[in-house]
Image (tube, rainbow, N blue to C red):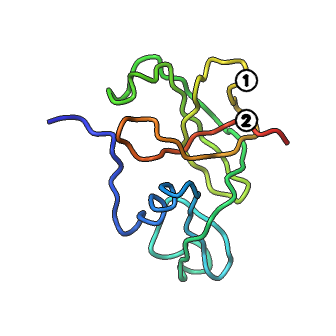
Amino acid sequence: MAESADPIINDLNRPFWDGAAEGRLMLPHCVETGTPFWPPSPVSPFAGGREVDWRTADPRGTVLARTVYRRAFQRAFAHLLPYGIAMVGLDGGPRLLVHIEAPDDAQAPRPGSRVTLRFKVLLEDGRPLLVASALDD
């Protein structure tokens, strides 16, 4: 069986991937509190599990941690070696795992770096994935 790097898309996360195709970071928000959250859920983790609405989210945040792969964890990403993955705490609250391009470069985001997230196709015929870029505040 061939390895796939394609995400599993279902009714629960489809708004995220639809937004990605348009270059917009879409996250579920609690309708009552307006608080964004991740991972997606059919009910809000806030305010006693109330209604959820998908909205465009602020893509700015701070790198909390990162790792650099020097061997491909997935064969589909081997051509990107070395590649970095970071956990970014968005200013709005949720934490997301994102890619860091050229992680060995001196200007590459590191823990504590302010970043903005954007979508970029990293794999041939792949979907746009989140990539962190240094933010010039």
* On screen, residue 29 above or below 107: below
Residue type pointed to by label 2: Ala
Pointer 1 with pointer 2, Cβ within 8 A: yes
Relative image position of residue 86 (x, y in whole percent): 59, 36
* Residue at 38% over, 22% down: 78
Is 68 drawn above or below residue 36 in the view shown?
Answer: above
Q: Give the amino acid at mark 1.
A: Gln
Left or right, 106 with reference to 3:
right
> Circle 1 sits in a helix, a strand or a loop, which is it?
loop
- In the rendered structure, the answer to whether residue 54 lies left or right of residue 13 reads right
For this view, does 57 lie left or right of residue 127?
A: right
Label located before the other in sequence (1 or 2): 1
Q: Considering the image in quadrants, where does the C terminus appear?
A: top right
Kindly identify the residue that appears in the image at 68 percent across and 38 percent down: 63
Mark 2 Cα-neighbour bin, 10 Å: few <14, some 14–19, many ≥20: some
Is the residue marked by circle 1 packed among few (<14), some (14-19), or many (20+) residues within 10 Å? Answer: few
Residue for badge 2: 134
* Secondary structure at numbered mark 2: strand
Left or right of residue 23: residue 78 = left
Q: Quadrant of residue 133?
A: top right
Counting from the top left corner in percent of width and height, residue 80 is at 46, 24
x, y percent for residue 51 = 53, 82
Name the residue beneath numbered marker 1: 107
Q: State the residue at coordinates (64%, 44%).
A: 88
* Quadrant (top left, top right, bottom left, bottom right) of the N terminus: top left
> Residue 136, relative to residue 94: is it above or below?
above
Name the image quarter holding residue 103.
top right
Which residue extends farthest left? 1
Question: Mark 1 to mark 2: distance in Å?
Answer: 8 Å
Q: Position of residue 132 (x, y in %)?
A: 63, 39
